Amino acid sequence: MIKPAARLSDLSYGLRGPLPQLADTLEQQGRPIIRLHLGDPAAHGLPAPPHVLDAVKHALEHSRAYTAAQGLTAAREAIAAYYHRHGLALHPSDIHLGNGVSELVPLALQAFLNPGDEVLLPSPGYPLWAASVQLAGGVPVYYRCDEHNGWQPDRDHLSDQITARTVALVTNTPHNPTGAVWNPATLRTLADIARSRELLLMADEIYAHITYDAQHTVLATLAPDVPCVTFSGLSKICCIPGFRSAWMAVSGPRAATHAYTEAITQLASLRLCPNVPAQHAIPPALEHIHQTQDSLTGPAGPLRERLNTAWETLSHIPALTCTRPQGAFYLFPRISTATASPHDSTLADSLLRDQGVLIAPGSDFHLTSGDHIRLSALADPATINKAMTRIAHHFDTGTAT
Ligand code: PLP
């Protein structure tokens, strides 16, 4: 028998775990399932910008060769120009392209973590981060985001988690799973903490352009003097997660980041280069990013419409209470203690088996209270309405155990 490596034994990544597998099985048995558990806009029919698709199609024939490990120069120049428009001075050599933020996060962590190094992560938070810290030999340490304060990070709780082993502070705004957009004052505080405690900032900003009546702040612009890695990409804003088009940008004093950038390049070289056709999507995507943002999240945009529908219909379910999201495309409601509600995982399991609705339990996002669930609001309004009716029915009939 080939035994899996011991370091995988504690690793959890529920989003692709047993519940989605059960949903597949039920579907194979003829039960249609409404899937509200993943953040894939393409799977729900949201369109990619035609100019982005055209650029990739046109580049296809000339994309057969490897690029440099860091990625196409033209794409890195476009990313440097994009951050320059936000007020952050970067050189293309500060930028590394990757097959999704999901590839870049483990790479960035492996390039600097030593065994036992502690990394501060938001709770709740996107599970890729904790799994990647663990795989790199580090220890995830969670700081609280406060539901009573619009899910902004709790600065005092965060400070209390810092030890002599803490080496990095991870941020994620707009935030998955809560949809909170962290305000500039909060971000400044986090940057101050990183500066005074000499922590590397790691900013996951994949939802940077998915905001509703709130302004996203690029964390690195608030702290150009603090070493920071900003992660972003086109999966969400261009509705092309399957292309795996993403980047990370290292900012801060070169003297402090130079060796780290070299280590990243060394590691990135092992996978030769990211998928080349997808890199050609980046320059046109960034050139027209504001039009794309408007078309999705503006007054008539489908993301805004779907999120509003989801939030409004969910608000009519007495057993659930939800802070209104300002960004991304998820709802993260609390299950009221007044209901006969079970632990989040049990609820997710019964919603799937009894109502044919697949959602994610809050515990998949390192929230130990067990009283939240995450729903993605990407389905069309009719499907969202149907799902909410079924969820409401579940609570009404007391099928919750
Ligand atoms: N970071 C966050 C917060 C996410 O929600 C996701 C995907 O859902 C990712 C990173 C991964 O994105 P990518 O498609 O670029 O791998």
Image (cartoon, rainbow, N blue to C red):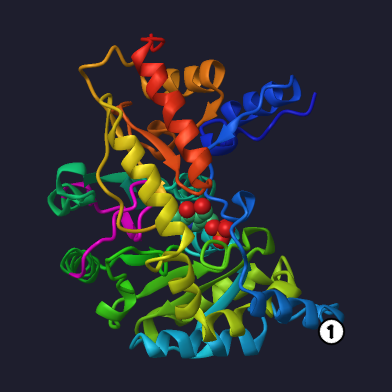
> Image quarter for residue 72?
bottom right
Residue 170 lies in magenta, yes or no? yes
Residue 263 lies in magenta, yes or no? no
Tell me if 64 is positioned left or right of 24 in this view: right
Whether residue 124 is visible to the viewer of this picture, yes or no, is no
Q: Which residue does the image show at 42% across and 71% down from the upper left? A: 229
Residue type at tag 1: His
Q: Main secondary structure of the magenta part?
A: loop
- Residue 62 or residue 196, whichever sits in front: 62
Q: Position of residue 135 (x, y in %)?
A: 54, 46
Q: Position of residue 88 (x, y in %)?
A: 36, 86
Q: Position of residue 41 (x, y in %)?
A: 56, 55
In what quadrant of the picture does the N terminus appear? top right
The number of numbered badges drawn on the structure is 1
Q: Which residue does the image show at 70% across and 70% down from the upper left? A: 274
Against 347, residue 281 (above or below) is below
- For the record, the magenta segment spans 160-184
Whether residue 153 is visible to the viewer of this picture, yes or no, is yes
Task: Residue under label 1, please give it.
Answer: 62
The CB of the residue at mark 1 lies under 8 Å from ligand 1:
no
Against 213, residue 151 (above or below) is above
Q: Which residue does the image show at 38% across and 65% down from the upper left? A: 203
Residue found farthest to the left = 156
Q: Which residue does the image show at 60% across and 49% down from the upper left? A: 44
Q: Secondary structure at mark 1?
A: helix
Crowding at label 1, few (<14), some or many (≥20) Cα neighbours within 10 Å? few
- Residue 309 or residue 14, whichever sits in front: 309
Tell me if 189 is positioned left or right of 194 in this view: left
Q: Position of residue 160 (x, y in %)?
A: 16, 47
In what quadrant of the picture does the C terminus appear? top left
